[in-house]
Image: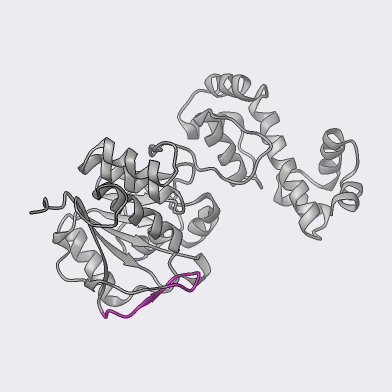
Amino acid sequence: MPPAPRLRIGFILARHFTLSAFANFVDVLRLAADEGDRSRPILCQWRVLSPDMEPIRSSCGVLVQPGERSGDPSRFDYIVVVGGLIDEVEPLHPGHTAFLRQAAAAGVPLVGVCTGTFILHRAGLMQGYRACVSWFHHDDFLNEFEGLKPVSDRIFVVDRDRISCSGGASSAHLAAFLVDRHIGAAAARKSLAIMIIDEAMTEDRPQPGLPLDLTTADPLVRRALLAMQQAMEAPPAVEALAEALGVSRRKLERHFRAALGLSPQAAGRRVRLAQVRHLLARTDRSLAQIAAETGFCDASHLIRQFRAAEGMAPEAWRSRHG
């Protein structure tokens, strides 16, 4: 007789959900629960839930057929809500919303993956909890939930009975975290290894963010660089950045020197100039518009800084690289 599942997950898939986030999560569960790489739910069990059993279309067009009706949420250890493209996120079926509130009342932990965190907030189920969102949706979150500041420099956040995840490959690491918690580290490592993922990332691992010409393995510096990217229009002072990261200014400067050979100010200028180059090459925005978007005082200030870094004026660079 097979052993009883040690980890039971119910999935709620929003319309236009992100297929990769869902698939990464499920594959970790199936590989941890199996012998070899066969797809049998032995130690883990998962179900796609629906109040009406209609197929659910992902953002890439692939349909997923729910496995069972929502029912009693207490039969699961976690309820995972997988969101999708921010412009295509539709309101949840009222039955899903009622089910999530019933789960919260019963103490079943709720998990938001990708824009699933937005969905939980809209249902009124994230008040008082920290929420992780992708750096890509950082501004979208601020615009929709006034006064709430998301965590967008980590791959996932565990806050009591709420868990939120930036999505994509991060959902595999979150699933491995849950497998480790309920089944064991060996099962989590095995799943990731079969998926050709080198190591499990803990929740404090920084999100990868936009492409940078500054690369480092130092988590503190990477988080600082991501914060600089997210505040490009109004670059934070070093003291404010250090405070937001929970370290002293001296410690932050020491890490930057060791990791990049630069001060935080110089690294921040490099980040902003990288965005300037991107905008020059990919858009027809004026220098004044680009200066405003990248934290330079005006076009003249931008031209001076750009010329010092590139040896030519921005318009000349645009003509060559645009």
Instruction: Name the main secondary structure of what is drawn in magenta.
Output: loop
The one nearer the camera, 42 or 170, is 42
The picture places residue 166, in percent across and down from the top left corner, at 44, 51
The range drawn in magenta is 52-62
Based on the picture, tell me whether residue 42 belongs to the magenta stretch.
no
> Residue, x 48% and y 26% (percent of image)?
247
The picture places residue 188, in percent across and down from the top left corner, at 31, 41
The one nearer the camera, 53 or 98, is 53
The picture places residue 59, in percent across and down from the top left corner, at 48, 69
For residue 313, side relative to residue 134 (left or right): right
Whether residue 215 is situated above or below residue 293 in the rendered picture: above
The quadrant the N terminus occupies is bottom left
The picture places residue 28, in percent across and down from the top left corner, at 34, 50
> Residue, x 11% and y 53% (percent of image)?
2
Whether residue 18 is situated above or below residue 174 in the rendered picture: below
For residue 38, side relative to residue 231 (left or right): left
